[in-house]
């Protein structure tokens, strides 16, 4: 179980796939853990070096004293990639992880060759909405937070599903003070001006049933970046990695192929965990795809 000792906390990370493969890095969102990506990674082809980690205050990573800024989340990612000697990676970020991915790409373009962003934007929520969420957390704890979050993350018919149960467990495993610190970092972030300068290849994925970051928010984010494509995932909520992992993996795999991100020819699926449904289903994945006219060679 590898950890990276940083100046103010320890970062828990994990590696799967081919150690000599092209690097792909995953950053999860608020209230989840690196396990969010289990079934997505299981559905990706072999041949990639797959790195994921628990954000500060999440999972097995440490929680330095608050307040936290988005810059601190960016520095954590930067230090992990430097520690592992990674360059030109594809960085996949969901929600909070997608926000820090944007900041990392602006700060360290040598580390990031392309972005895959899901359930995220340049700015999420308002000062009022984050203040209200903080009030719920302080007054009623993580149980109340979980109920409110699940209502945003999953459509009503899916709120008692297995993916929703997994999301609830991850939320309840988080300490309230860490949740509040992470919320504060998101509330204080607006990357509109800086993300608009990005021209690297990017894929922006929106869940059609996402109540936390609705599709129009994701489309606007994609439209900001000259190198971005937008995809609407039919049937997906906020956590496509849980409720549509194979569809998400299919989109990621296609993006990796379009940008030529490979050191080896694709091989069998990456062994990590059995998702129970059989990876590589070959079904007609229902999604809407909009090309952003990036001008890059795919």
Image: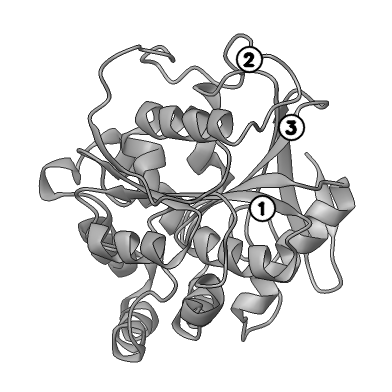
**Res. 266 mark:** 2
Does 232 sit above or below residue 279?
Answer: below
For the point 72% across and 60% down, the residue is: 77
Mark 2 or 1: the one toward you: 2
Q: Secondary structure at mark 1?
A: loop
**Tag count in the figure?**
3
User: Do the residues under discs 2 and 3 have CB atoms within 8 angstroms?
Assistant: no
Q: Secondary structure at mark 3?
A: strand
**Res. 60 mark:** 1
- Mark 2 to mark 3: distance in Å? 11 Å
**Res. 22 mark:** 3
**Mark with earlier residue (3, 1):** 3
Q: How is the image coloured?
A: one colour
**Residue positioned most to the left:** 157
**Mark with earlier residue (2, 3):** 3
- Asked if one can make out residue 203 in the rendered structure from this viewpoint, the answer is yes
Expressed as whole percent of the image width and height from the top left, the position of residue 164 reads 29, 44
Expressed as whole percent of the image width and height from the top left, the position of residue 96 reads 50, 64
Which quadrant is the N terminus positioned in? top right
Does 34 sit above or below residue 187?
Answer: above
- Mark 2 to mark 1: distance in Å? 32 Å
Expressed as whole percent of the image width and height from the top left, the position of residue 49 reads 73, 31
Side of 112 where 191 appears, left or right? left
For the point 46% across and 78% down, the residue is: 192
């Amino acid at each position: 179980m590898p950890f990276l000792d940083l100046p103010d906390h320890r970062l828990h990370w994990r590696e799967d796939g081919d150690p000599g493969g092209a690097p792909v890095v995953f950053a999860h969102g608020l209230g989840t853990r690196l396990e969010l990506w289990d079934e997505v990674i299981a559905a990706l082809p072999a041949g990639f070096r797959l790195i994921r980690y628990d954000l500060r205050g999440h999972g097995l990573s440490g929680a330095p004293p608050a307040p936290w800024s988005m810059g601190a989340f960016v520095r954590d990612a930067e230090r992990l990639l430097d520690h592992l000697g990674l360059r030109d990676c594809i960085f996949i970020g969901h929600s909070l992880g997608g926000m820090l991915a944007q900041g990392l790409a602006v700060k360290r373009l040598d580390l990031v060759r392309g972005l895959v962003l899901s359930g995220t934007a340049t700015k999420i929520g308002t000062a009022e909405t984050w203040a209200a969420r903080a009030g719920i957390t302080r007054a009623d704890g993580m149980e109340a937070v979980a109920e409110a979050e699940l209502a945003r993350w999953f459509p009503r018919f899916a709120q008692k599903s297995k993916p929703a149960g997994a999301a609830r467990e991850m939320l309840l495993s988080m300490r309230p003070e860490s949740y509040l610190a992470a919320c504060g970092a998101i509330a204080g972030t607006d990357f509109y001006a800086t993300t608009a300068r990005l021209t690297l290849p990017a894929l922006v994925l929106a869940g059609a049933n996402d109540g936390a970051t609705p599709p129009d928010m994701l489309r606007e984010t994609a439209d900001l970046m000259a190198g971005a494509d937008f995809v609407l995932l039919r049937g997906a909520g906020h956590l496509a990695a849980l409720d549509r992992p194979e569809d998400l993996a299919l989109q990621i795999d296609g993006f990796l192929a379009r940008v030529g991100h490979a050191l080896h020819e694709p091989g069998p699926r990456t062994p990590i965990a059995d998702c129970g449904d059989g990876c590589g289903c070959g079904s007609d994945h229902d999604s809407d795809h909009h090309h952003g006219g990036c001008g890059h060679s795919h």
